[in-house]
Image (spheres, rainbow, N blue to C red):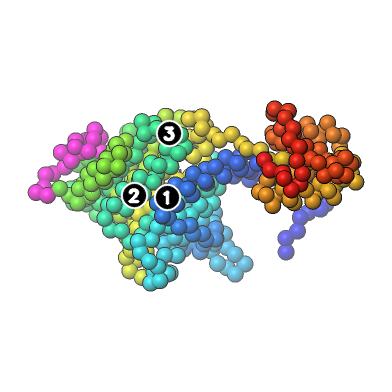
């Protein structure tokens, strides 16, 4: 049983739990606008919405999410039936579970999206919180890099809808296949060392150059210097020329070239290869990508995603090609603030009914029902305050129109709709009223 202590005199704090946000109506209005952008954009590409519970068995994340997220960032607890439960830190494992469960009945290619709230025990800072909402967009059953091109195209559309121009942001690409080729074939590392090296590269910007170099030397010995030269390549051409030349271009490199070419054909040219882009999750198998604002004030990725062709096979139902991305509400809000595109809030109602004399309340309530049936958003002032106070209140809420309802209006049925900004009045009846 849980019960609130009624005896303690200490006042409860009004603060929200560390790292999570309350959404008061003005903030909620912005949040709704962000969700609107997400929904309308992905639906123009034919994506369908799905949903799931925030609770998942903890083991779902152990297999492939990556150590950092599982060991340090999950909210995990034991339930009353001794099951280990995790508040989902990301949606991809849940989605893979759902698609694997219904694989035989589903019609592929599958285009699905969701807007889940996710929980990560992180140090709260600009762009990072402990509960955020994340649009997830995923496509299943497309083997070719057209899946990458489509999802990156969607990511660019959404970034533009926040108010950024193509010159304001950049898509960064890498390929797990290239990194596997480099670490295993070119540098001869075993799986464990290759994994460690990719985690080291993932941390490159967060640690000192000397620490990075030391880590690389531990794993690569005297080949560390040549690896650092490769990692510091200026661009894609420079990177490929630093690799041993083979008769045919490596498949991973060819994929990167095709994605860049395909996006260019769609008019997206702010794309660049980034050999240091690792992405934290272990399930990616091919192209990985992130979108960044070029304004240094927003240093966190706007979007992150990639191909994960092996994740569904964890559920024993065979392989399904999969590509997708996630993008958060926090960075969306930060971008709108940076680029001055935060939507102004709209008034909560189109019309306020002001009651003069309590005896006229039933008439006002009835009129409100008629207005609402005409899709006019109507609020009735139930305060019983002075007429001037009621008008002030409507004005504070920026409600554009009012109708005063007194004995005269009730007797004659003649109503005056007053426009608060122009002062103009229109006389009508309950039947003829419209805005
Ligand atoms: P992720 O890179 O961890 O990927 O997250 C994607 C995006 O979610 C980030 O770029 C950022 O905008 C936002 N985000 C992540 N963590 C936080 C946080 N603590 N606070 C605020 N925003 C955050 C994934 O989660 C993958 N499961 C995405 C994916 C879908 N891959 C394939 N399909």
**In x, y percent, where is residue 13?**
72, 42
As drawn, is 180 to the left or to the right of 91?
left
**In x, y percent, where is residue 248?**
12, 49
Q: Is residue 142 above or below residue 427?
A: below
Work out whether residue 266 or residue 336 is closer to the camera in this orientation and state it: 266
Tell me if mark 3 has few (under 14), some (14-19) or many (20+) residues whose alpha carbon lies within 10 angstroms of its own. Answer: many
Q: How many marks?
A: 3
**In which quarter of the view is residue 62 placed?**
bottom left
Q: Secondary structure at mark 2?
A: helix
* Residue under label 1: 44
Name the residue: 46% across, 30% down.
Answer: 297
Q: What's the distance in space between the residues labelled 1 and 3, CA to CA?
A: 20 Å
Name the residue: 15% across, 48% down.
Answer: 249
- Pointer 2 or 3: first along the chain: 2
Tell me if mark 1 has few (under 14), some (14-19) or many (20+) residues whose alpha carbon lies within 10 angstroms of its own. Answer: few
Q: What's the distance in space between the residues labelled 2 and 3, CA to CA?
A: 19 Å
Checking the image for residue 387, the label placed there is none
Please indicate, yes or no, whether residue 192 appears anywhere in the rendered image.
no
* Residue under label 3: 164
Work out whether residue 83 or residue 360 is closer to the camera in this orientation and state it: 360
- Residues in magenta? 228-248
Q: Residue furthest bottom?
A: 104
As drawn, is 369 to the left or to the right of 215?
right
**In x, y percent, where is residue 243?**
16, 42
- Pointer 2 or 1: first along the chain: 1
Q: Secondary structure at mark 1?
A: helix
Check if mark 2's residue and mark 1's residue have beta carbons within 8 Å. Answer: no
**In which quarter of the view is residue 411 placed?**
top right
- Asked whether mark 1 lies closer than 8 Å to ligand 1, one says no
Q: Secondary structure at mark 3?
A: loop
* Residue under label 2: 150
């Amino acid at each position: 049983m849980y019960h609130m202590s009624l005896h303690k005199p200490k006042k409860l704090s009004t603060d929200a739990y560390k790292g999570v946000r309350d959404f008061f109506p003005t903030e909620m209005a912005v949040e709704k606008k962000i969700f609107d952008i997400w929904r309308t954009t992905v639906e123009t590409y034919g994506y369908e919405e799905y949903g799931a519970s925030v609770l998942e068995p903890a083991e779902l994340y152990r297999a492939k999410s990556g150590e950092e997220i599982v060991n340090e960032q999950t909210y995990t607890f034991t339930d009353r039936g001794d099951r280990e439960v995790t508040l989902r830190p990301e949606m991809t494992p849940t989605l893979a579970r759902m698609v694997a469960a219904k694989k035989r009945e589903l019609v592929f290619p599958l285009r699905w999206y969701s807007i889940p709230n996710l929980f990560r025990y992180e140090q709260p800072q600009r762009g990072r919180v402990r509960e955020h909402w994340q649009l997830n967009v995923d496509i299943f059953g497309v083997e070719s890099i057209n899946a990458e091109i489509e999802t990156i195209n969607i990511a660019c559309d959404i970034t533009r809808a926040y108010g950024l121009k193509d010159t304001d942001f950049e898509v960064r690409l890498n390929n797990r296949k290239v990194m596997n080729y480099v670490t295993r074939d070119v540098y001869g590392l075993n799986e464990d060392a290759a994994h460690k090296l990719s985690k080291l590269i993932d941390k490159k910007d967060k640690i000192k150059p000397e620490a990075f170099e030391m880590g690389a030397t531990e794993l690569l010995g005297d080949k560390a210097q040549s690896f650092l030269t490769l990692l510091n390549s200026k661009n894609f051409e420079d990177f490929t020329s630093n690799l041993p030349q083979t008769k045919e271009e490596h498949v991973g490199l060819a994929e990167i070239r095709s994605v860049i070419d395909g996006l260019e054909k769609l008019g997206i040219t702010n794309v660049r290869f980034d050999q240091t882009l690792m992405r934290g999750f272990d399930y990616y198998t091919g192209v990985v990508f992130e979108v960044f604002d070029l304004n240094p004030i927003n240093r966190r990725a706007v979007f992150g995603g990639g191909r994960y062709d092996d994740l569904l096979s964890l559920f024993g139902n065979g392989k399904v090609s999969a590509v997708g991305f996630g993008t958060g509400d926090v960075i969306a809000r930060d971008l709108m603030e940076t680029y001055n595109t935060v939507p102004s809030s709209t008034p909560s109602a189109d019309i306020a009914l002001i009651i003069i004399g309590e005896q006229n309340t039933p008439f006002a309530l009835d009129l409100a029902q008629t207005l609402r049936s005409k899709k006019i958003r109507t609020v009735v002032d139930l305060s019983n305050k002075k007429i001037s106070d009621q008008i002030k209140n409507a004005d504070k809420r920026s409600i554009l129109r009012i109708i005063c309802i007194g004995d005269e209006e009730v007797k004659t049925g003649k109503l005056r709709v007053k426009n608060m900004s122009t002062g103009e009045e229109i006389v009508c009846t309950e039947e003829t009223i419209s805005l």
